[in-house]
Image (tube, helix red, strand yellow):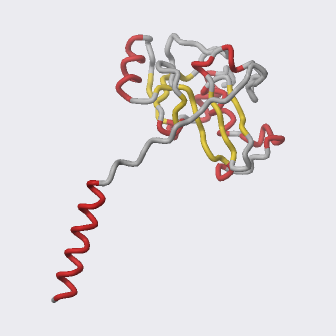
């Protein structure tokens, strides 16, 4: 009986302790490109259109930059196409980062929302606009004729081929 009482007290106290602890801080990301940094997929200088820039940091310390979310996701789905980067699987990725189109803030790509079919076009043409939160993504889609909003893991490789004109 005492053990049961002690177990309940311990469980309740741990539950209370976790509810009064500060929430886990969001990770801060950095887009540390230079004027010489080029997109791996399109070979564009990424600094010219900062609202579109994406980056994948690998666990080995290497950083790969992209001129748009479309290019980043194209690489994500088929990294073997760029074998010289040395990615064998998704386990090689440390961070996947995109720029919030509205705030210009680097954000976690897997948590972002992507608008397909809007009037906004990247240096590589039709693209996916990345936005940090769903409310702003819905507003952007409504204002700029976006057809659909996706989360990162919902973006099919076929959509990337479609907007690249490779159906």
Q: Is residue 103 above or below residue 93?
A: above
Q: Is residue 17 above or below residue 159?
A: below
Which quarter of the rendering shows the C terminus?
Answer: top right
Judged left or right of residue 132, residue 106 is right
Q: Position of residue 35 (x, y in %)?
A: 75, 19
The one nearer the camera, 32 or 89, is 32
The one nearer the camera, 53 or 26, is 26
Q: Residue at x 44, y 27 (%)?
A: 149
Q: Position of residue 19 (x, y in %)?
A: 27, 55
Which quarter of the rendering shows the N terminus?
Answer: bottom left
> Where is residue 10, by image quadrant?
bottom left
Which residue lies most toward the right here? Answer: 84
Q: Position of residue 122 (x, y in %)?
A: 61, 15
> Where is residue 46, by image quadrant?
top right
Q: Residue at x 58, y 13 (%)?
A: 121
Q: Residue at x 51, y 17 (%)?
A: 117
């Amino acid at each position: 009986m005492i053990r049961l009482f002690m177990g309940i007290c311990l469980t309740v106290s741990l539950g209370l302790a976790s509810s009064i602890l500060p929430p886990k801080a969001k990770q801060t990301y950095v887009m540390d490109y230079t004027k010489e940094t080029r997109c791996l997929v399109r070979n564009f200088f990424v600094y010219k259109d900062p609202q579109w820039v994406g980056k994948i940091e690998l666990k080995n310390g290497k950083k790969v930059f992209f001129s748009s979310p479309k290019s980043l996701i194209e690489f994500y789905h088929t990294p073997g196409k760029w074998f010289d980067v040395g990615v064998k699987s998704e386990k090689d990725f440390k961070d996947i980062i995109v720029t919030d189109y509205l705030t210009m803030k680097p954000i976690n790509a897997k948590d972002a929302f992507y608008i397909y079919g809007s009037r906004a076009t990247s240096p590589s043409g039709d693209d996916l606009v990345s936005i940090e939160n769903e409310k702003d993504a819905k507003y952007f889609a409504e204002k700029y004729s976006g057809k659909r909003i996706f989360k990162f893991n919902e973006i099919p490789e076929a959509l990337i081929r479609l907007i690249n004109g490779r159906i």
